[in-house]
Image (tube, rainbow, N blue to C red):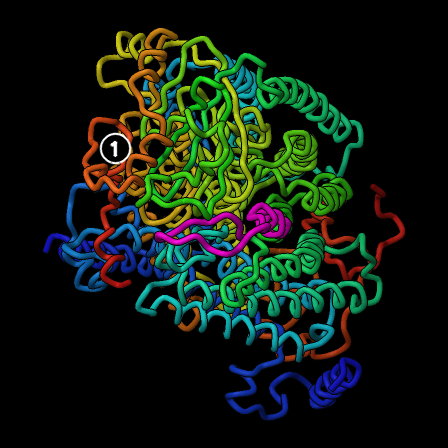
Amino acid sequence: MSSIWIIVAFILGFLIVFQIAKASEYVAILRGEERTRRENNRINGFLMLAFLIIGLFGVWYCNHTLKDKILGEPASDHGVRVDTMLYITLAITFIVFVITQIGLFYFAWKYQEKEGRKAYFYPHNNKLELIWTVIPAITLTVLVGFGLYYWFEITGEAPANSQIVEVTGKQFAWEFRYPGADGKLGARYYKEIDPTKNNPLGQIWSDPANRDDIVGSQEMHIVVNKPVKLIIYSKDVIHDVGLVHFRMKMDAVPGTPTTMWFTPKYTTKQMKEKYGDDFAYEISCDQMCGAGHYSMRGVVIVETQAEHDEFLRKQKAQYAIAMEAEQGATPAKAVSGDSTQQKQTTPVQPQGGAVSQRIR
Amino acid sequence: MNNESQIHVQEGVVDVHHDGNGHDHHHKQSFVSKYIFSMDHKTIAKQFLITGIIWAIIGGLFSVLFRLQLGFPDETFPILETFFGKWAKGGRIAPEFYYALITMHGTILVFFVLTAGLSGTFANLLIPLQVGARDMASPFMNMLSYWFFFLASVVMMSSLFVSTGPASGGWTMYPPLSALGQANLGSRVGTDLWITAMALFVVSSLLGGLNYVATILNMRTKGMSMTRMPLTIWGLFFTAILGILSFPVLLSGFILLLFDRNLGTSFYLSDIYTAGQALPNEGGSPILYEHLFWFLGHPEVYIIILPAMGMVSEIMSVNSRKPIFGYMAMVGSLFAICVLAFLVWAHHMFVSGMNPFMGSVFVLLTLLIAIPSAIKVFNWITTIWRGNIRFTPAMLFSIGFVSMFISGGLTGIWLGNSTIDIHIHDTYFVIAHFHIVMGVSAFFGMFAGVYHWFPKMFGRYLNNTLAYIHFWVTLIGAYLIFWPMHYMGLAGVPRRYLDFSAWKSFNQFGSLNHMISIVTIIVFAVNLMFVFNFFYSMFKGRKVRTLNPWGSASLEWTTPINPGHGNWPGEIPEVHRWPYDYSKDGREYIPQTEPISANESKH
């Protein structure tokens, strides 16, 4: 009901504005169009200056209210680089922003039409134009230089001692695989995928490297201060592993595994101590992936090496889980002791899942 | 009928009313050939503009709908269920509906409004009028261009009404999401219709573009050398070239997508397990599609912005009563932008898994494009410096354009730098950036053009008071909507999320979203008021009584107030100078048609 009232209010407001606008046109003709035009010119000229001043205040105010809600501490070494680059760029572009906007609106106000003023015939000035070609060129060279230096550091080869974690995106959840004691991830092939046979990632069981691989979902465990290399897969459509606190992002592309590496600086526990119990390192899907895109959330747990070893020790290799099930033991489904099974039964349900189900 | 004979027919017509002394004696045209299947470039321009306005209302309305969801996630709007039924059960927007809305919002505004509605309108209206031609090189192709656009519109519109909904994979339509009906509701028949409509659209834009280039190169009046053309024409010229070279690539990408969808090919599909089933496709790569898409997708943003730049240059010069500063630099920077536009597409793909070395090349080329953009901004500011500025509505929107272009252009330097892009890619920062730099800016350019050339189109003026309200509310509103989004982007808030309640890192902007949605509704309403002003003034606006209401030096104002088909009743005027001789030698302005006198100062 209230929506209808709002619409009615808009229509009424519009009618009033229109009547005033129409009347002002008649008044203008009565008073002399030229006189009205000059008056309007002065009003708009003044508004130019007013907009400039209020606008710059608004820029400050916006920053003042929002600056504490953005860009928490970068939690990885790459994140520090990204933030540095960001602040360098901010400094340069902000200076240009202020100068050009002031120039634009101040000149608009200053040189508004005045009786007796003659515009200055000034078609070109090669020196001036050269100056403002060269200065931006130099500035941009600096930005490109810094940018590429950091870019190659971030996208370069991961250190040899990196922990390896495989991340797989699917419509609307994340799955992870850790290599186990041999430090190697076994081979996988998408046609082997069969969740009913406890093989969610399509691991090829004949590959011995697969025997000790551990599979989990929704929570990724990594070790603090140790480089981690993510090998990223997608099962269905393009997803994106977005790690806002680490300032990292990489698409998950079906058919083309991608990689990303970084070194986390603080454990989840340390961050909770700093920023409250509500803190979580979140994985967001940053590439449109369907109706549940907005709910495709994962969590990263950064822990100490000891805690991590303890975590892995408690997990059962996916191979063992799959083989148990294969042996015809129906209760295998009820092996709810391991975390993998538990979490897989609670996939993130998109709000409208029901809608699409029905139409299908 | 080939072009040759077409032109002859054209000239025949003109001769008739030349002899018959004025356009009143124009040979009788039926309603259909005058207003519907018209070959008059001015009528086709109006057709593009009005179709564009209708699309803009729909596209804008969609943004209001999804802003309702974003601004008021906890409220229900029963009125939505009344209109949209199952898509808004209980007055809440379903995710499938939300994604259809954002997809169609993007498609409609980028292609149907800011490409066809903007360059379609003003290229058609201004090219013949400003270069001094009777009509386009091929009026027939020109007419076809509009009707292909109309067909594209019909197909796109019909896709809104299919039971599984329109395409909903985002306006970029990345496969596999857009290729797999089982992965996404909108990827069923909606996407086939989307691809069909876009194919028709590409045909329309090629027919138009080839015509624009041919007209500009071959049909300039005597004395109108390339360097005497108004900057509007330069802008439209480069726009047409960009379109001709890049739209076919997009079409090829779409055709492969159509094959993947319907014929079982694997151009983009590989290793897919969806809906409990492993698909047979192997060896394809979605990244190929991304390349093909962005090879148009990036030039597309310049296709949108160059006509606006051209018009703004012209309007600023006229209303500052000063020549545009650095004409040759302006042309040169348009040219540089046109060339670089083809070399930067992969900056949309820094985190797509593309080789990082290739990314670095695109960083360099992308940041290069900031140089011609900077030149243009400085030249505009210098143009108004020491002018004698008349704040006509067109001038106001031009100043607004420059302001928006600065704000949005500078954040391009952030995004073009791959290191920063890692963090803000696909966040609200991107939304803020491109809405300011190509959404709002291009709209401002379009509004400036409409206000400036409305008298030429309809022989009447738009209402000024409504125009001032329109400008100030839209300028302030646009900044209120998009400026704070930069902050959301820096916080990493991903785009295309309809609900943040499950997240700990992104849910701190509730009240901000609230404010943005309210402002969106107000700005939308004020722009509806502009639409009303447009149609009302078409019939009831103040009549134009002088040939040259803005005191402009360019050629279009030498035509009669309501020019007939053929534009000039007599000979096409000859041109003797560039179109920017304002305040020269103490004279208010010197029209292009006036010969250079012996004691005129040189520049």
Most extreme residue toward the front, as rendered?
A: A327
Residue A316 rendering spot, x and y as whole percentages: 32, 24
Most extreme residue toward the right, as rendered?
A: B598
Residue at the spot 74% in from the left edge and 68% down from the top edge: B215
Q: Is residue B588 left or right of residue A230?
A: right
Reply yes or no: does residue B283 show up in magenta.
yes
Q: Amino acid at mark 1?
A: Lys
Q: Nearer the viewer, residue B181 or B448?
A: B181
Q: Nearer the viewer, residue B165 or B204?
A: B165
Range covered by the magenta-colored residues: B269-297
**A3 w.r.t. B428: above or below:** below
Asked if residue B462 can be seen in this view, the reply is yes
**B596 w.r.t. A331: above or below:** below
**Residue tagged by mark 1?**
A343
Q: Is residue B104 left or right of residue B235?
A: left
**B459 w.r.t. B522: above or below:** below
Q: Write down the chain letter for disc 1.
A: A
Is the C terminus of chain B in the top left, top right, bottom left or bottom right quadrant? top right
In the rendered image, which quarter is residue B324 located in?
top right
Residue at the spot 62% in from the left edge and 56% down from the top edge: B551
Circle 1 crowding by C-alpha within 10 Å: few under 14, some 14–19, many from 20: some
Residue at the spot 56% in from the left edge and 83% down from the top edge: B37
Q: Is residue B487 left or right of residue B254?
A: left
Residue A81 rendering spot, x and y as whole percentages: 53, 15
Residue B55 rendering spot, x and y as whole percentages: 42, 63
Residue at the spot 41% in from the left edge and 13% down from the top edge: A223
**B37 w.r.t. A203: above or below:** below
Residue B481 rendering spot, x and y as whole percentages: 36, 38
In the rendered image, which quarter is residue B129 located in?
bottom right
